[in-house]
Image (spheres, rainbow, N blue to C red):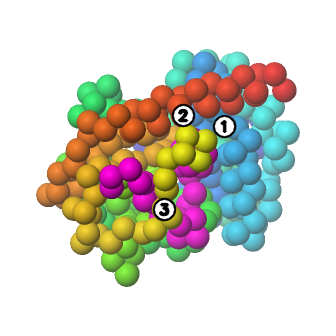
């Protein structure tokens, strides 16, 4: 299945037709990547994603195949030639032996429905941890294992549990637990720090919402009344259930965090347009 969702894509700075897209340029060798939400043809939190891309490349001891200025120009070129109202965009630096490739392309988004925001989704516990949690790299083997378990168990997202029995993050999200008036989320050094998570933490600081950077033990999740994920596609999405444990989704704080995040996202789009 062709991963490119659209009519066009960028390959090494050139605009190409989607029919020539080759998945092997992404999945063979090593790949560092970013996924950015695009709203009305504008990337959300562009500069935050670029900072993380540079950080991932540095952690993996690779080199930037394209600079930020070139990436911005290519995103604008792609969004003008293939317009989408709401979509996710993937930036990939692929290092395959002596061949380096740089790609920008749309991927099919899976956004939660209003019903899922209202009623929550099902999560599962998955015992695994990332090798280099601070960098965003493609791990096809881990992703496939998680995907198959999610299908078998009817889950929306997998919560990763490390060898100490601690929940660190989601397979494609960050995780927050709520108890009384305090949020709990894993410390930065144990996870891939998501862009959405970063702005949720900023919102909490700005609104005097207490946050503790502590990992929750998998066998203690019932000590918490609510759990939600943050990410590029889900934004702020509550869990109604994790394995067989049920959680409250009717929490005004979760909806308020989502509302305030959307305001910040709009501000970032306006900044991108004005530059």
Q: Which residue is drawn at 45% across and 51% down?
A: 173
N-term mark: 2 or 3: 3
Is residue 78 found left or right of 35 in the rendered image? right
Q: What stretch is highlighted in magenta?
A: 179-203
Give the foreground label among 2 and 1: 2
Which type of secondary structure does the marked residue at label 2 adopt? helix
Q: What element carries label 3?
A: strand
Q: In 3D space, how far apart are the residues under numbered discs 1 and 3 (Cα atoms)?
A: 25 Å
Q: Is residue 64 left or right of residue 34?
A: right
Residue that protrudes farthest toward the left in the picture: 244
**Residue 233 falls left or right of residue 103:** left
* Mark 1 or mark 3, whichever is nearer to me: 3
Earlier in the chain: of badge 1 and badge 3, it is: 1
Q: Of 126 and 222, which appears nearest the observer?
A: 222
**Quarter occupied by the C terminus:** top right
Q: Marks 2 and 3: which is nearer the front?
A: 3
Residue under circle 2? 261
Residue 214, relative to residue 258: is it above or below?
A: below
């Amino acid at each position: 299945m062709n991963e490119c969702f659209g009519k066009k894509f960028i390959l090494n700075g050139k605009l190409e037709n989607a029919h020539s897209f080759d998945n092997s340029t992404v999945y063979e060798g090593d790949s560092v990547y970013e996924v950015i939400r695009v709203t009305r043809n504008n990337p959300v939190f562009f500069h935050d994603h670029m900072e993380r891309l540079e950080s991932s490349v540095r952690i993996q001891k690779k080199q930037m195949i394209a600079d930020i200025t070139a990436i911005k120009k290519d995103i604008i070129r792609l969004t003008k030639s293939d317009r989408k109202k709401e979509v996710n965009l993937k930036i990939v630096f692929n290092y395959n032996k002596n061949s380096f490739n740089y790609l920008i392309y749309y991927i099919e988004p899976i956004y939660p429905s209003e019903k899922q925001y209202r009623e929550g989704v099902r999560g599962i516990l998955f015992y695994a941890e990332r090798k280099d949690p601070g960098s965003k790299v493609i791990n096809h083997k881990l992703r496939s294992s998680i995907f198959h378990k999610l299908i078998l168990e009817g889950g929306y997202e997998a919560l990763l549990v490390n060898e100490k029995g601690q929940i660190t993050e989601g397979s494609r999200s960050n995780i927050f637990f709520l108890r009384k008036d305090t949020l709990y989320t894993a410390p930065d050094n144990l996870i891939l720090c998501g862009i959405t998570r970063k702005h949720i933490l900023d919102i909490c600081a700005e609104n005097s919402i207490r946050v503790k950077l502590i990992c929750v033990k998998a066998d203690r999740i019932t000590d918490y009344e609510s759990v939600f994920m943050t990410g590029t596609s889900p934004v702020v999405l509550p869990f109604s259930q994790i394995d067989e444990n049920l959680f409250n989704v009717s929490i005004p704080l979760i909806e308020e965090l989502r509302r305030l995040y959307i305001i910040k996202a709009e501000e970032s789009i306006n900044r991108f347009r004005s530059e």
